[in-house]
Image: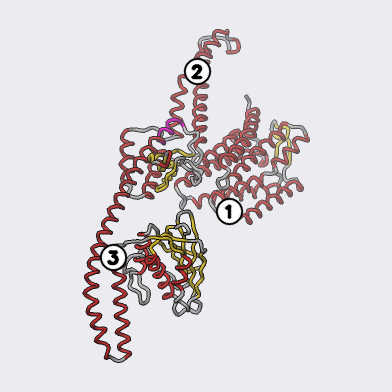
Amino acid sequence: MDAYRLYYASLILQSLISPLLAIWLWVKAGRQPGMKALSLFCVGIGLWATGQLAINLGDEGLSQFGKMLVNTGPMNTVLFLHFVLAFLGRLRPARMLAWYGLAVILIGLITVLDMGQLVPWLAFRRYYIFPAWGWIPGIFVSAVSSWAYILLLMAWPAAAPKKRGQIIALCLAGVWGSASTLMFLNASFGIPIFPYSVILLPFYAVLLVFGIVRYDVMAVNLWANRLLAWLALGITTIAVAGLLLSLVAQTGFAPLASLPLWQLWLLGTAMLFTTLLLERPMRSVMEKLVFPGAHLEAGVLAAWRQELEAATSWPQLESLAGAILGTHLHQAMSVIINAGVTNNTGNSDHLPDTPCVHCYRETGKALHSVGWVSELKGWEGATPSVLRVGEVFGALLAAAAERLEQLLRYAGQENLRLQQAHLLELGGLAATVAHELRNPLNIISMAAVDCPAETRAEIRAQIDRADHLIQDLLSYSGDIRLNCQPVQLLELVRNLCAAHTTVNIQIAIAEDVYVLMDRLRAEQILGNLINNATAMLRGRHDPCLKLEAKREHDMVIMHVCDNGPGVAPDLVKDLFQAFKSRRPGGTGLGLAIVRRLTEAHGGTVRLISHPDWNCCFELHLPVAPEP
């Protein structure tokens, strides 16, 4: 095959490969940022190759059509820039539209001003060259492409390991593409050398797509493994055939075309035997190249088990597992652990599009727990050995999750036991202190009867404050006994808010919202929150407090929000701890009591961020049916 036939064959191959790659990319990875622009870029490469074929092999009319296809080069460059910007998270739609508009204008100028000409060159009947003014689109294409690669290189230092690998692959593919098309310009420069480099162009789109999606779509690695194995096998087979032909020539046989049938059969049999003999080793070598870490050893499993069992929290186990598996397979790997969520189907709606290991507690019929399981999501196309690695790792991860769940449960139970014991001890101490303090306080109160009115009022205020502290201490530390019954939340809130006439109070609670709580304790919970809010609103010209609640399944979600100064950032972490925060005139136990009483009812309370309010507490309270 001479150079011209090889040149045309490479263009045909490029015109076939590129649209197939584009379709595959659109279907398999179209939801990832920039992938649709990349697929259109592949279409553009195929159109360029088709245009070159039409110019070189078609008649006059077809060659002009081919010239129009080649002239779309600026649009293809902008598509590549679109992909790079989306890939880096820097895409601005308005600016991108401006780039596309500029490309359309440039294509129009190329057509109107005839910036590309078809002339005979070497043995080509027609060849595309740039006249002097035709370098304008060439400069545009070079500048935009260079800017795209500069953006990639600038993003490399701060990129995650996976993205770094993709950036390197993009740059290497770009070098390959530039080198492949470099000699295409020989005719425009007046260099009478055949464009051999264009023969390498079909591999450009393949390398580009493989370098980007190999981390996200397992099937890409499988096909790369097969392609490389068969390519290496083909090269080896050709070498063996050449060796056999040399031996035939040395033994004085006639040329291959005139060989007897039995000799041709012998040669074909030898080549087939060689192919079958080398196929498995070649596949194994290529698999190790494309899927490093696809084989396991006992030492590796023991190390994995030890590292996974060292985790002490769910985020740590998730991060550690992803790092271990990613390091072993030499590609970024996500691990998703659904702690606290039972599922008998492994709901994957929240899972990423990239390959990941999904670990969750499975439930069987009647919601009976089955145990922790792991599933491989997005591993379609992985080789059996890689799937085996994933399955073994998933089993170890599930065992580690089971162990961590038990440890956290035991730790929680122990903490609860210690906390209850501590509170009971504190409650006994508080009761003793309260008894010992109230007698002197009563004596002080009676002794102050003959004091001036102003002094008597001050003494009375301080005695009340001390009594309030004693009551709060008893509420916080004492044994909690509940008499739960349906309580209409709207009526309870209205009664508590009636005394606060200086504050604009908004209530958004339906009449049919009932909570299953001890009424006195419910008054204490909401009363503390309302009192805290109104105390912080003193002095404001527009004090406003809002209480809203709604039913959600088996809980009532309630918000108590105000437009006061809010909570200082350094207090948020320990806001519900005793004596950690204190409003003016408060004891430092109000929010601690709120949390303890709420949790005693099976509910929760937390500080949340609300866009319309400076301070907002969210309570989850047990719902009760309307009586």
Q: Nearer the viewer, mark 1 or mark 3?
A: 3
Residue at (47%, 79%) from the top-left corner?
502
Three-letter amino acid code at the position of disc 1: Leu
**In this rendering, would 333 be left or right of 410?**
right
Q: Which sits in the foreground, 352 or 350? A: 350
Q: State the residue position of label 3.
A: 477
Give the x, y percent position of residue 616.
Answer: 45, 66
Q: CA distance from mark 1 to mark 2?
A: 55 Å
Please give the range of residues in magenta.
Answer: 383-390
**For mark 1, does the 10 Å Cα neighbourhood hold few (<14), some (14 to 19), or many (20 or more) residues?**
some
- What is the C-alpha distance between the residues marked 3 and 2? 92 Å
Residue 579 seen by the camera: yes
Residue nearest the observer in this picture, 312 or 188: 312
Up the image or down, 242 lies above or below 12; here it is above
Prevailing secondary structure class for the magenta stretch in the rendered image: helix
User: x, y (%) of residue 598?
Assistant: 38, 61
Image spot of residue 491 (x, y percent):
47, 68
Quarter of the view holding residue 90: bottom right
Mark 1 or mark 2: which comes first in sequence?
1
In the rendered structure, the answer to whether residue 124 lies left or right of residue 348 reads right
Answer with mark 1 or mark 3, whichever residue precedes in sequence: 1
Would residue 205 appear left or right of 431 to someone viewing this image?
Answer: right
**Residue annotated with mark 2:** 243
Residue 91: assigned label: 1
Q: Residue at x 68, y 50 (%)?
A: 103
In percent of the image, x 60 and y 55: which residue is there?
A: 92
